Amino acid sequence: MSFTRILYTTADRTTRITLNRPEKRNALDDVMIQELTTAIVSAGRDQGVKVVVLSGNGPAFCAGADLAYLRRVAEYDLEQNRMDSERLANLFRGIYELRKPIVAVVNGPALAGGCGLASACDFVIASAEHASFGYPEVRIGFIPAVVTLFLVKRIGEGRARELVLRGNVISAKAAEEIGLASMVVPRAKVSEACDRLLEDLIVRNSLTAMGLCKETLSKLHGLNFIDSLEFGANMNAAARMTPDCKRGLTGFLRKEKTEW
């Protein structure tokens, strides 16, 4: 695969997708959105990949939409804007529903759509000194309509309302306090923290089980109580029938460590 906006590498059962427009603070445009979508699909299909890491090259994680892109969008008609918004929605859905854990490593500002990228990931590791998060769209008369869904799922509606209505930018520590960031570590320790997390996910956990967990979490929202229980029971039964579960239970009963 050939990309112009991102870097894509795979090694040690890990795909690393790096936003690579440091001169533009890794701002999103239509090309990057398409490349990210392609990269996520590719990582999902690669049977040798167990986890995905999303990061940004340079001092920013992602500063939101590119200015040149915004100028073009300003000239779109309703149908063009709808189609463009659907492409953005497909990217975030792809990240959220990827049946492999995806870790966002936030080394600097993650704003607007960039904050949305982090919000859609399963884990967010943030630099204590340099990471910041925010949805400042209301300050330019816009709304974070697509990414708000993933923000609400991550931190709840009450806190999401505060972020999107005020449009303020918060620190990594504040993001951790509200559940937006999974862990905050000194910048010099970010890579180490990421590697420890990846080792846990790769070595200790079944990929099939993690994928089923993600499917369960993504589909529970919107179901009523009874339907949720029925769905959970069906997923429980399906999980028991997987080769990973049979192998893992056999190892557990024999008091043997299962190698994943």
Image: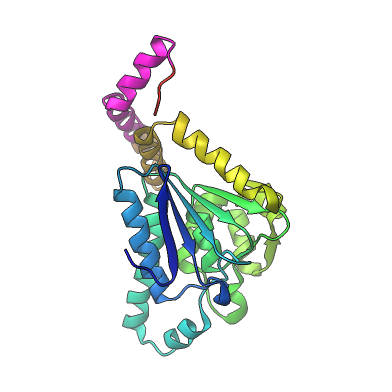
How was this image coloured? rainbow
Give coordinates of residue 95: x percent, y percent: 41, 55
Give coordinates of residue 124: x percent, y percent: 57, 50
Depicted 242 relative to depicted 2: above or below = above
- Is residue 178 at least partly visible in the picture? no
Look at the image and tell me in which quarter the C terminus lies: top left
Taking the spot 56% from the left edge, 62% from the top edge, the residue there is: 115
- State yes or no: residue 238 in magenta: yes
Depicted 204 relative to depicted 250: above or below = below
| 106 to the left or right of 71 | right
Depicted 13 relative to depicted 174: above or below = above
Q: Which residues lie in the magenta part?
A: 229-256
Overall secondary structure of the magenta section: helix
Give coordinates of residue 82: x percent, y percent: 35, 76
- Is residue 119 at least partly visible in the picture? yes
Q: Quadrant of residue 110?
A: bottom right
